[in-house]
Amino acid sequence: MSDAPPPGRDLVADARERFNALANYKVTLKSISAGTEAVEVRYAWRKPGFVRMDFIRPHAGATLTYSPESGKVKLWPFGFDTFPRLMLNPDSRVIQSPQGHRIDQSDIGTLLLRVRELQQHGDTQIVGVETIGMRRASHVIVTCEPGRLIAGIFRYELWFDVVHGLPVKVANEDASGKPIETVLMEDLRIDLPASQLDSFG
């Protein structure tokens, strides 16, 4: 049996529904952008928006947590629950990525909302099913209409896992076709028991 999606299937909408039903997830994010150092982070998210990021590179050992209850970010430069500990706002440039990503807008749901906005002003194409790492994934391209950009992005390429329907790889480009960022989402685990989630601080 083919694992290709049926024609006309909106895999972005399917992924949004799947995300909205999640209680939590953990993943290793590997981000590559032109002109900047590669980033690798152990990332955890828990409904309704708690986030924990443990950096592997750069800033190895640093931990960031975000609480939607307080609206604040805690930064441990030398590891979780060590000193010093800094309290910051999520829009602080100290903790934004070179691409301007914020920890409170870093989850899969926020990504899918941005892709959906671009979808509404462009074209969506299902390319086919490919292998990403050890996963089979449906390759989707979303391209904005000419003359329009959404947050500086003209085109997204996404690979949705054929089993759980969530993205396992995302790449985007500007209007000239220049790559902006490529993110691999490795070892994505969803709806884990509380015992398998680290503290969100």
Image (tube, grey):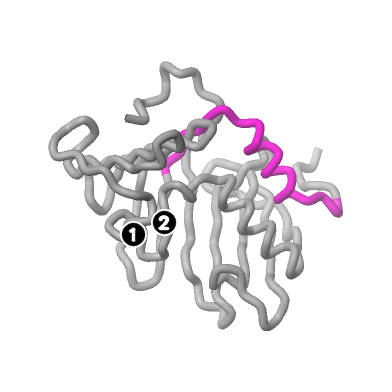
**Residue 55 image-quadrant placement:** top left
* Disc 1 residue type (three-letter): Ala
- Whether tag 2 and tag 1 are in contact, CB under 8 A, the answer is yes
The question of residue 196 being in magenta is answered with no
Residue 102: where, in percent of width, then height? 42, 54
Residue 90: where, in percent of width, then height? 38, 50
* Disc 2 residue type (three-letter): Ser
* Residue 115 visible within the image: yes
Dot 1 falls on a residue whose secondary structure is loop
**Tag 1 or tag 2, which sits nearer the N-term?**
2
Dot 2 falls on a residue whose secondary structure is strand
The quadrant of the image that shows the C terminus is top left
**Which numbered circle lies on residue 31?**
2
Residue reaching furthest right?
7
**Residue 20 image-quadrant placement:** top right
Graded by Cα atoms within 10 Å as few (under 14), some (14 to 19) or many (20 or more), the crowding at tag 2 reads some
Q: Which residue has dot 1 on it?
A: 38
Q: Which residues are magenta?
A: 7-28
What residue is shown at x 60% (from left), y 31% (from top)?
22
Residue 7: where, in percent of width, then height? 86, 53
What residue is shown at x 41% (from left), y 16% (from top)?
195
* Residue 44 visible within the image: no
**Which numbered circle lies on residue 87?**
none
**Left or right: 54 with respect to 77?**
right
The question of residue 20 being in magenta is answered with yes
Residue reaching furthest front?
70
Q: CA distance from mark 2 to mark 1?
A: 6 Å
What residue is shown at x 35% (from left), y 38% (from top)?
65
What residue is shown at x 61% (from left), y 58% (from top)?
114
Residue 41: where, in percent of width, then height? 36, 45
